[in-house]
Amino acid sequence: MKAALLTLIFLLELAMLAAAGWWGFTLDAGWPVRLLAGLGAPLVIAVVWGIFCSPRATVALPAPAKLGVQAACFLTGGLLLALAGRPVPGALLVALWALDKTFLTLSGEKI
């Protein structure tokens, strides 16, 4: 069960990055702006995730703070997907993360 939950959360992390890229590439702007936003938004989220949330994070946060950063990243991904005209998948991304995170926490997994 834990393996399935860990796999799902990894796939949701990838979906969060894809959502940020989708938003950037679908902006109603010139191609340089779309390119910058489409590559920059996922990069910013990935850097924040890597610094604070990854298993090899350079900044060790207490569990509540780490959860807050994770929630902020996923809420940002969901919001950007909604802004790209896909509100249902954006809400589903956040809801699935929250549900998966809850089950992982209840199973004793610390991620």
Image: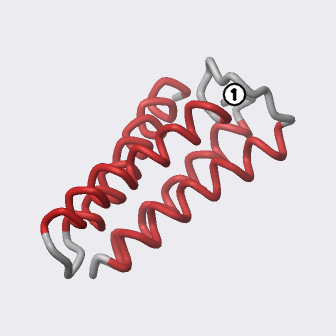
Counting from the top left corner in percent of width and height, residue 3 is at 48, 24
Q: Residue visible at 47% across and 47% down?
A: 44
Counting from the top left corner in percent of width and height, residue 85 is at 27, 81
Secondary structure at numbered mark 1: loop
Counting from the top left corner in percent of width and height, residue 18 is at 30, 51
Q: Is residue 98 above or below residue 65?
A: below
**Left or right, residue 33 beside residue 94:** left
**Left or right, residue 14 beside residue 91:** left
Q: Is residue 88 above or below residue 56?
A: below
> Dot 1: within a 10 Å radius of its alpha carbon, few (fewer than 14), some, or many (20 or more) residues?
few
Counting from the top left corner in percent of width and height, residue 75 is at 55, 64
Task: In this rendered view, identify the residue nearer to me: 105 or 34.
Answer: 34
Kindly indicate the quadrant of the structure image that contains residue 78: bottom left
The mark tally for this picture is: 1
Q: Residue furthest top?
A: 56
Q: Is residue 48 above or below residue 33?
A: above
Q: Residue visible at 73% across and 46% down?
A: 67
Check disc 1 and give the amino acid type: Glu
Which residue is under mark 1?
109
Q: Residue visible at 68% across and 49% down?
A: 69
Q: Is residue 107 above or below residue 97?
A: above
- Looking at the rendered image, the quarter that the C terminus falls into is top right
**Left or right, residue 71 beside residue 36:** right
**Left or right, residue 36 beside residue 47:** left
Task: In this rendered view, identify the residue nearer to me: 66 or 38.
Answer: 38
Q: Residue visible at 20% across and 81% down?
A: 28
Q: Residue furthest left?
A: 31
